[in-house]
Amino acid sequence: MNKNSFSKRALEYNQYLSKVNIDLPKDYKLINPFKESNKKQISKIANIFYNKYYSDNNPRRLIIGSSPARRGTAVT
């Protein structure tokens, strides 16, 4: 893995997310896979994925959008 590759930076950010605490209103819950009971498996999978596909310094683009189900009934 490149010393300062995108994969290294992404995995460091995932580590940061594992420590994030956000106070939410009652009846709301934050789902954080990097902090939940499966965090070891999630971390292992993320490491394999990022090191396989992102261990370089190529430019990236992030596309954010919503994907509602038919008739707009999906929770996004």
Image (cartoon, rainbow, N blue to C red):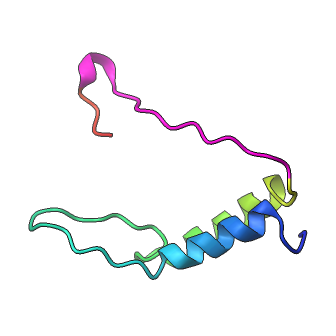
In the image shown, does 1 or 41 lie closer to the viewer?
Answer: 1
Across and down, in percent, residue 2 comes to 90, 69
Classify residue 28 by image quadrant. Answer: bottom left
Locate residue 52 relative to residue 60 in the image: left or right: right
- Which residue lies at the image location 67% right of the left edge and 70% below the top edge? 11
Classify residue 54 by image quadrant. Answer: bottom right
Across and down, in percent, residue 6 comes to 77, 61
> Is-magenta flag for residue 4?
no
The quadrant of the picture occupied by the N terminus is bottom right
- Which residue lies at the image location 40% right of the left edge and 67% below the top edge? 32
- Which residue lies at the image location 85% right of the left edge and 60% below the top edge? 55
Residue sitting farthest toward the top: 71
Q: What range is drawn magenta here?
A: 58-72
- Which residue lies at the image location 72% right of the left edge and 58% below the top edge? 49
Across and down, in percent, residue 44 comes to 66, 72
Q: Is residue 42 above or below residue 73?
A: below
Classify residue 14 by image quadrant. Answer: bottom right
- Number of residue marks: 0
Locate residue 62 relative to residue 74 in the image: left or right: right
The quadrant of the picture occupied by the C terminus is top left
Residue sitting farthest toward the right: 2
Across and down, in percent, residue 56 comes to 87, 57
Locate residue 2 relative to residue 28 in the image: left or right: right
> Is-magenta flag for residue 61?
yes
Residue sitting farthest toward the left: 26
Predominant secondary structure in magenta?
loop
Q: Is residue 57 above or below residue 4?
A: above
Residue sitting farthest toward the bottom: 19
Locate residue 15 relative to residue 20 in the image: left or right: right
